[in-house]
Amino acid sequence: MTHPSRTPPSVPCVFVGDAPVDDDIDTVLAAGRGLAYGDGVFETMRAVGGVIPWWSAHRERLRRGAARLGIAMPSDAALDAALRDLLHAHSDAVIKLVLTRGSGGRGYAPPRDVPPVWLVSASPLPPAPRSGGLVLRWCDLRLAAQPALAGIKHCNRLEQVLARVEWSDDGIDEGLMRDADGDVVCATAANVFVLRDGRWWTPPIDRCGVAGVCRAWALPALDATEHRLTPDDVLSAQAVVLCNAARGILPVARLGDHAWSPHPAVGEALRRLADAHPAFPVIDRGSPWA
Amino acid sequence: MTHPSRTPPSVPCVFVGDAPVDDDIDTVLAAGRGLAYGDGVFETMRAVGGVIPWWSAHRERLRRGAARLGIAMPSDAALDAALRDLLHAHSDAVIKLVLTRGSGGRGYAPPRDVPPVWLVSASPLPPAPRSGGLVLRWCDLRLAAQPALAGIKHCNRLEQVLARVEWSDDGIDEGLMRDADGDVVCATAANVFVLRDGRWWTPPIDRCGVAGVCRAWALPALDATEHRLTPDDVLSAQAVVLCNAARGILPVARLGDHAWSPHPAVGEALRRLADAHPAFPVIDRGSPWA
């Protein structure tokens, strides 16, 4: 069982360079490029028992994203100290880290030698997944191909917002997104894996989509491979799962009119994740998929 | 002459719904969807003599962008009051208005019935344009085709940021951007018009790019038409100008190795703009283009 808390997200702690900011936070944020242009990257991480088991993988993806955009990284010591303080108060939570390019909201040219502005905050754990498996839909909005931004978890997320706005039915858990060619890329907030001929496939993330930390774990752990996936490849798969670092692996029960029955490979994937990450024990599932 | 001031941008004034916010601005911004996802739209406007001559056009574009994204608009009275106060202190300036979807930084689904968060701020006028005409380059980064976002001035601007980061040579004023098909779309912060056979052409903004307020003025005022433009169409044009609402029409002198001499149609365009907008008198140009 997950334990969704009713407490609201914590007030984000704000840092400039390596130093926490206490005064003029409003100016730092209001005049910042994060707000002006989505000029930043972020991580959404699962904390359990006061630690973030996949922190090193998140930090490396953050570093890759920052390098792609040319944003300076805070020091490891500053990141560690900020997370330590946050985890002390929020030991089992979803931890969000946003790293922006810092000040400069007029003109796309970044000012030189401006320290990055970054924030950490904690949110309650998400509700436990539907025990019978997720219910998905197809999103109408197509992801644009932008190789320069593909893979990194940048803060330009209007495509995901618009896709998520397509439905308000609480009976739908997630939506699958396609690119302009019609190939399946991901869900709005998760990567997708499909089982075909007993092997796990996931779409490449070279034109659009986010290279998720749970996806990066799953590729070798499940001996999965990257393949472009058509909608028919998904619908004719033996099993479909979504995954992200906040919720682990989530079996899919339905996509539109199509339904999947539990498959042993899904149970095996859940067990491997349980061995790898203490926030995702199989017993939590309480579902036929385990 | 423009009068670039050395004063820094004003501290943005922040509003929630129709009300100014004085307390907890940091929380409003740090936990907001503007910062989290670039979930908003903005306007960059030229104030002259304490008024924004094109305010009604900016407000209509803001309204169209907000409608496309499903973001609530503040009331006209609240917008007018906020701008009136700002213009009182900054009568000749570049005024920026950012309208975000408001709170909710965890999860792409927007919370229901949350008021928008918006900001207004003033920046000094930009430096006077190079009197001999702008010097341009080609940007390597290609704009992705996303019809759902094309035309509106949304806050997902990483493509423009990455394109602008491609050069740091102060001798280059702007960069022309192409889409994935190689067609010319715009500059990083301006629309582009080219003169061919004595007629002005500008690219359509149906797949990517921003439908600028100065562009919207120029289409009928210059009897211009929308055409897809190849790089060769630009290089073989009789004249090229950029335009935006902050700086008006800017003649282009060079693009890479190619140079243009002053053309009477450019002077005529500058005179028409001068008649339409008091911030852009022809006499300000002091250039052979006028």
Image: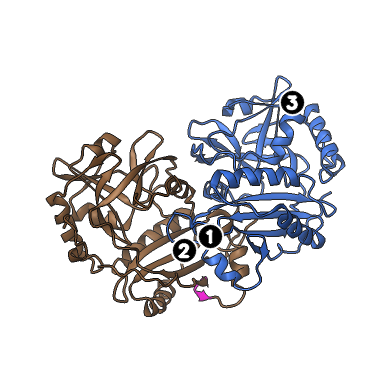
Chain colours: A blue, B brown
| Camera-nearest label, 2 or 1 | 1
Q: Are marks 2 and 1 in contact (CB under 8 Å)?
A: yes
The residue tagged 2 is B98
Main SS of the magenta segment?
A: strand
Residue B91: x percent and y percent?
A: 34, 76
Q: Are marks 2 and 1 on the same chain?
A: no
How many residues crowd around disc 2 within 10 Å: few (fewer than 14), some, or many (20 or more)? many
| SS at badge 1 | helix
SS assignment at label 3: loop
Residue at 52% x, 76% y is: B20
What is the three-letter code of the residue carrying label 2? Answer: Val
Which stretch appears magenta?
B16-20
x, y percent for residue B133: 24, 52
In what quadrant of the picture does the C terminus of chain A appear? Answer: top right
Q: Residues within 10 Å of mark 3 (few under 14, many from 20)?
A: few
Point out the tag, 1 or 3, that comes first from the N-terminus: 1
- Tell me if residue B72 can be seen: no
The residue identified by callout 3 is: A223
- In the picture of the structure, the residue carrying the numbered disc 1 is A35
Q: Amino acid at mark 3?
A: Asp
Disc 1 to disc 3, how far (Cα)? 40 Å
Judging depth in this view, the residue of A89 and B219 nearest the camera is A89
